[in-house]
Amino acid sequence: PDVRLAMTLYRWDASYRDAFMLKGGRGGILLGNGYPHLKAFLRDLYVVMEPTIDFVAIRQYYRIPQAIEKAAGSYDDYGAEEKKEEGLPPLCDLHPIMASASEPAGPRP
């Protein structure tokens, strides 16, 4: 199995969708049913990879650029007022993502 692909896909629901504002498409991979084959692939690998996946660290890492941009914008003369009022978007809840990952893959669609 392609572990690099798996790690990228695990990041999708926990980070990428919120950090890069990717709300369109068929939804999440572990959340939702838009990508059933990828969901099954991740669930199969999660049994083996669970001890090495830190969803909290993944989620927080992709939050750093937003925080830096907000901090830099607060000292910028152009548009500083708008940036001060905008808060960072809330972090996603990891419990449904981890629960979905730990479910058995079951038969392929």
Image (spheres, rainbow, N blue to C red):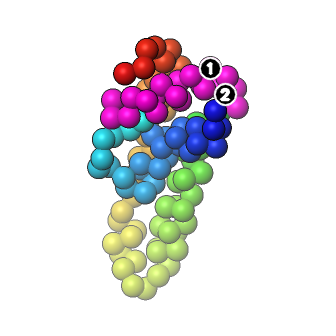
Residue at image location 53% in from the left, 29% down from the top = 42
Mark 1 is on which residue type? Val
Q: Secondary structure at mark 2?
A: helix
Dots 1, 2 in contact, CB < 8 A: yes
Up/down of 40 relative to 4, above or below: above
What crowding class fits label 2: few (fewer than 14 Cα within 10 Å), some (14-19), or many (20 or more)?
Answer: some
The residue range painted magenta reads 31-52
Q: From the image, give the main secondary structure of the stretch colored magenta.
A: helix
x, y percent for residue 103 = 49, 16
Up/down of 6 relative to 98, above or below: below
Between the C-alphas of marks 1 and 2, the distance is: 6 Å
Residue at image location 50% in from the left, 69% down from the top = 69
Mark 2 is on which residue type? Met
Residue at image location 36% in from the left, 52% down from the top = 22
Residue 20, quarter of picture:
bottom left
Residue 84, quarter of picture:
bottom left
Considering every residue shown, the one lying at the far bottom of the view is 77
Asked whether 59 or 41 is in front, the reply is 41
Residue 1, quarter of picture:
top right
x, y percent for residue 95 = 47, 27
Please tell me the numbered disc located at residue 78: none
Tell me if residue 18 is in the magenta stretch.
no
Left or right: where does residue 39 sit relative to residue 85?
Answer: right
Q: Is residue 98 visible?
A: no
Residue at image location 63% in from the left, 38% down from the top = 2
Please tell me the numbered disc located at residue 49: 2
In the rendered image, which residue does mark 1 sit on?
47
Number of on-image labels: 2
